Amino acid sequence: MDTTQPSVARAYDFALGGKDNFEVDRQFARAIKERDPEVFVTAQLNKDFGRRATEYMAKQGVRQFLDLGSGIPTSPPSIHDTARRFQPDARVVYVDNDPVVAAHNRALRAVSSGLALVQHTFLEPETIFAHPDFISTLDTSEPIGILFCSVLQNTPADTLADVLSRLRARLAPGSYLAISHTCERTSQAVKEAFAQQHETKGYPKTWFRSDAEITEFFAGFDIVEPGIVDYRDWYPDAELAANRPELNTQFTCGLGVLS
């Protein structure tokens, strides 16, 4: 465990009000907040998109979920809590390569049947699908709902295209892919803050991609309405629809289904 550099998962945990982070993570989050006072709101909205996407998939009958880059279980509801509101027997595999994330997932999530944790990078889907805990939890002959919530922006696009292609090849028809991703509409001040943290503190490089670039990650999937949109506009609940916050750090999101 490297506590000398900020971690994506631990900084996100701090932004959501969690306690499973170190001073280096808090320093990073505060540095971004200096440029964007609403960045913690952004983090919560991203989590809310994951909840809404999970609800949508569960309502379509999906009973299996794979949360890639799952992060620390900071605040409820978790993916399995949300899915089981609509599919009581829903099964979930959480995947993250951060050892702090893995420890907390094992303690807080792997407490009932149908839940598992695989400590690994999402960049190697073959290894994840071959893991005994994955095999004993999810059935690849049936649809699986895949979630990448605020994960892909720290990886080069050519690498992601290859990973997503390999992932898609292992999914059954009717599987879903949910993505939220930092987008180019983010303010220049925020982009510069992330770049500075990358150069001086070792925080992973962050890409702010266009809607068209993010759409390419759904190759092979049919995009569900309302399409690739600002995550404040993807099936917002009543409160979000009535109080759409202005943001400096912006995200694009979408959901695709494999036909």
Image: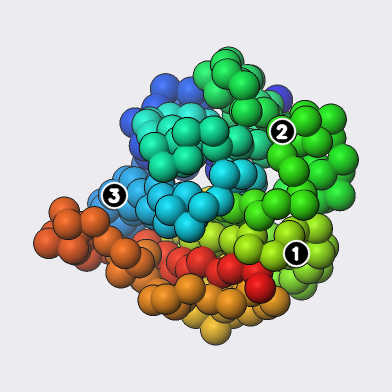
Q: Amino acid at mark 2?
A: Thr
Eye-nearest disc, 2 or 1 = 2
Q: Earlier in the sequence, mark 3 or mark 2?
A: 3
Q: Residue at x 77, y 52 (%)?
A: 141
Residue 225: percent from the left, percent from the top? 42, 76
Secondary structure of residue under mark 3: helix
* Residue 196 in the image: above or below residue 97: below
Q: Residue at x 54, y 61 (%)?
A: 179
Q: Earlier in the sequence, mark 2 or mark 1?
A: 2
Residue 140: percent from the left, percent from the top? 76, 49
Q: Which residue is mark 2?
A: 137
Residue 231: percent from the left, percent from the top? 37, 64
> What's the CA distance linking mark 3 and mark 2?
34 Å
Is the residue marked by circle 1 packed among few (<14), some (14-19), or many (20+) residues within 10 Å?
many
Is the residue marked by circle 3 packed among few (<14), some (14-19), or many (20+) residues within 10 Å?
some
Secondary structure of residue under mark 2: loop
* Image marks 3 and 1: residues in contact by CB distance under 8 Å: no
Task: Give residue 168's mark.
Answer: 1
Q: Can residue 32 be seen from the camera position used here?
A: no
Is the residue marked by circle 2 packed among few (<14), some (14-19), or many (20+) residues within 10 Å?
some
Q: Amino acid at mark 3?
A: Val
Give the residue furthest to the bottom. 212
Q: Is residue 53 left or right of residue 222?
A: left
Quadrant of the image containing the N terminus:
top right
Q: Which residue is mark 3?
A: 41
* Residue 168 in the image: above or below residue 65: below
Q: Quadrant of residue 213?
A: bottom right
